[in-house]
Structure formats: C-alpha cells, structure tokens
Image (tube, rainbow, N blue to C red):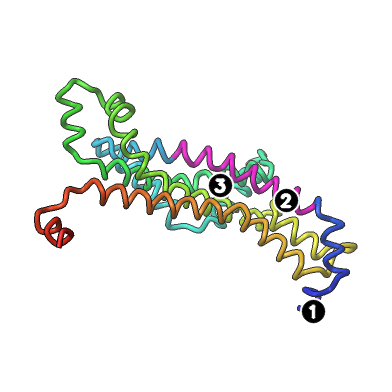
Amino acid sequence: MTEMFSAAAWRKVWTYRLTFLLGLWNTVRTAFLGLLLSVALGVIFGLMATSGKKSLKRISRVYVELIQNTPLLLQMCFVYYAFAFSGHSLSIIFTGVLALGVYHGAYMAEVIRAGIEAIPKGQFEAAHSQGFGYVSTMSEIILPQSIKIILPPMVNQVVNLIKNTSCLYIIGGADLISLTYSFVTGATTGGAYAPAYLVSGLLFFIICFPLSTLATVWETALKKRERAAVPKDDTERMVEEA
C-alpha cells in the first residue's frame, strides 16, 4: 500500500488518464444501451405478467425466474461463447449490452409488474366499464399512475446495471475495470495498483452516487405525498389539536 502515497505512481496514472476516460466512456455506453434493452424487456414482460392471460404470465414467470436465479457472469459467458462457437462472434461491447439488458430486464419486469399491481383493481374495472380496451387502459390510465411507483426502484436498477458492467472483465472487455486491470498489469504501465483502482472506484462513485441519492430522495418524497393524501381520522385530529 506504500504506492498509495507514491508520487511516481500517481504521475503514471495521470499520464495515462485517457485510458481511464476511455474505460469510463465504454462503461457508460454499454450501460446506456443495456438500459434501453432492459427497459424494453421489462415493459414487455411486466405487461405480460399483468395481462391476466395464464400463458403470458407463465412465459413471463419463466423468464424472470430463470434470469434472476442464475449469475450474470454465467449468462455473459454463455452469450459470448455461444455466438463464438456458432461462427457468429459478437463484439465484447455488444455482448455486454445483450447480457446486461436481458439480465436487468428480468428485474425491470418485476418492478413494472409491482407498480401496475399497486394500482387499485377498481381502476381497471372502471376503465373496462367505460369501454376502454387493454392497451388504452394501460397507456391512458394505469401506467401514468404507476410511473411514480416504478421510477425509484427503476433508478436503483440503473445503478446496479452500471456497476455490473464490471462483469465484462471476464470476457476481456474494454470497460473501466478491464482497462484498469490492463493498466496495472501492463509491461510499461504496471505497478500503480492502489492509485489506479482508487481512481476507477472514484469514477464509478461519481456516476452511481447521484443516481442512488436521487432514488432515495424520490422514494422519500413519494412516501410523504402518500401520507399527506391519507385522510386523518377524528382521533388523530384531536391528538394534534391537543
């Protein structure tokens, strides 16, 4: 750990700062594209889970349980080597996007399912009685109300997705963690372990901390609005007046 305070080690990290910025860019790009895929899958399977049709609910359940109960590292290796052995090799970035999107899509599906199911069933019945179909009910009545419930846990999933880009390391990725490892083990750049990993961790923190804070603040504000919306009974009013 003496290198933590080594000026030479820190100068080496600064000299090769573009390596870390490239890793950060690849991490952000992979996370953004993976997020788009995960949200798309989450909406599809979340709606399937709440469609009321047993066949669609079963398909959604199988997807969620299969993905959530197997490691992301295993899924990433499977995607990478399955395509490689079939003669259709994917780029490491695209492999990461696909694996991260499918993995977090299962969690997004659960978030969306829970958000939809939190809406009182009377809303569905009222929409049906007014002649709304399933699509119009969801798009015009249910989803707009469930957004405020869905967004806080969805932001948490975004944070987890960003951190899970580090799994690209297992297939030789170009993400921040992979390039940091290449830096500290390189023939001309090796040795500055502590400063390099500290900088890498700091870059992750700069991205993830504001998002996780936003999710916490959002959730707290939502709970306050819900408490404020609940009418107080006479006993509570008397206690407060006293």
Say which element carries label 1.
Answer: helix
194 horizontally vs 47: left or right: right
**Where residue 174 appears, x then y in whole percent?**
72, 50
Tell me the residue that label 2 is attached to: 23
Q: CA distance from mark 3 to mark 2?
A: 18 Å
The type of residue carrying mark 1 is: Thr
Tell me the residue that label 1 is attached to: 2
Asked if the residues shown at circle 2 and circle 1 are in contact, with their CB atoms under 8 angstroms apart, the answer is no
Tell me the residue that label 3 is attached to: 99
**Which quadrant of the rendered structure holds the N terminus?**
bottom right
Q: Is residue 25 magenta?
A: yes
Q: Residues within 10 Å of mark 1 (few under 14, many from 20)?
A: few
Disc number for residue 113: none
The type of residue carrying mark 2 is: Gly
Q: Earlier in the sequence, mark 3 or mark 2?
A: 2
**Which quadrant of the rendered structure holds the C terminus?**
bottom left
Task: Determine which quarter of the picture holds residue 130.
Answer: top left
Say which element carries label 2.
Answer: helix
Q: Is residue 239 above or below residue 123?
A: below
* Residue stretch rendered in magenta on the structure: 19-41
Instruction: Pick whichever, 51 or 177, lies toward us.
Output: 177
